[in-house]
Amino acid sequence: MLNKKTLPLLHKRKEGMRPGSLIYVGDSECEETRIRTHVYDATGSDTYEGFSMEEPDKQRWIEISGLSDIKGIVEVAKEFTLSNLSLEDVFSTDQRMKLDYYENYFSLTLRILDTPKKEEEQLSLFVGENWVISIAEHASDIFVPVVSYLKDTETKKRKANAHLLFHALVDRVVDQYLVRADELVQLTEEMEELVINTPEKVAASDIHKHKRKILHLRRITLPLKDILATLIRSEHVDLGKAAVHLFRDTSDHALWLSEECEMLRETVSGLMEVYLSSLDVKMNKIMKVLTIISTIFIPLTFLTGLYGMNFSHMPFSSQFWGFYAMLICCILIVIFMAGWFKKKQWW
């Protein structure tokens, strides 16, 4: 994780530059740029390494991963008249999820979640009449199923416009959000059971880390439902009936995701309160036992202190059985007080 002190320096790299300046602003090293061109129509699908404008009458998906070759990415962008302002957001990798409209295309910025092998990254999608450009910070296998869709002779995505391909890409990212939400739900339930039954096995730092994961997912996905609702009702883009129906289904998923994140946030906040309360209860039990022990020893301390005074004449002090009588008296006092506390249900 980045040191918090270095975060402001990310934006300092662009300080004083004019809008539309293309410079990489990210919290990790640039990965080598790889460009693949997927060309498809109802008859078939082909994939070319690098950028290709072959078969211009077909639909195409330009898949770009890695941001090291800014010049190469700009050359691809020029072929589709992408503005520098929209490309600026590609290289500023701390963008929030958003939807932007331009004259001949629109763009959507998303976040691809981290995996055990990959860190979290930004994804920028540009959609025109018969083309889609996806630009990701790092190479990822998240879109492997989409490539398989295009190669499938039965899929409808090859027979439709680019908006169905755009939906397939968005849907893969949203599916990742849903899977992460399911994982957090399961972890929350397990943690809730531990906090209630065996709070000593849970640390406050564990609950705090879990809460941060939930808040992070909530923060990056919060705008999603509004963005999809705006896209469906937009007058700037004609998605077509098929794409609209698909995006409505994705919008339902986004709504569920928003509600689930909110519920998880409230649940974990409640868990912290329950955990702190359980600590108080445990401490009260300990103090209760110590108080009972101290109370039992009060009369014993009184008797031993009384007979510890250096007077010449003390009752039973001159008798050989005096010590044993006092010992038996102390034992009876302990038994009596312990029984009384049990009867009162104080112990």
Image (cartoon, grey):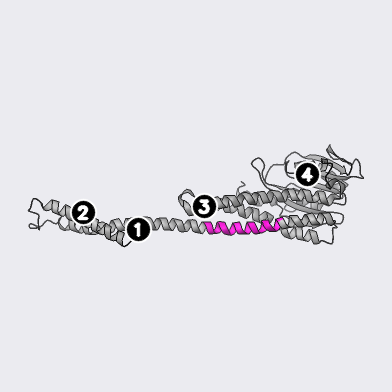
Q: Earlier in the sequence, mark 4 or mark 3?
A: 4
Amino acid beneath label 4:
Val
Comparing labels 3 and 1, the label whose residue is closer to the camera: 3
For the question of whether residue 17 can be seen, the reply is no
Q: Name the residue under label 2.
A: 331
Residue most toward the top?
49
Residue range in magenta is 253-271
Q: Earlier in the sequence, mark 3 or mark 1?
A: 3
Q: How far apart are marks 4 and 3 (CA)?
A: 39 Å
Q: Give the secondary structure at mark 1.
A: helix
Residue 134 vs 330, above or below: the answer is: above
Q: Distance between the residues labelled 3 and 1?
A: 26 Å
Would you identify the image quadrant in which residue 239 lies?
Answer: bottom right
Q: Distance between the residues labelled 4 and 1?
A: 64 Å
Identity of the residue drawn at 58% across and 59% down: 266
Amino acid beneath label 1:
Lys
Amino acid beneath label 3:
Glu
Q: Name the residue under label 4.
A: 146
Would you identify the image quadrant in which residue 16 lies?
Answer: bottom right
**Label 1 environment density (alpha carbons within 10 Å; few <14, some 14–19, many ≥20):** some
Q: Does the magenta stretch include residue 337?
A: no
Q: Position of residue 247 (x, y in %)?
A: 78, 55
Q: How far apart are marks 3 and 2 (CA)?
A: 43 Å
Q: Give the secondary structure at mark 2.
A: helix
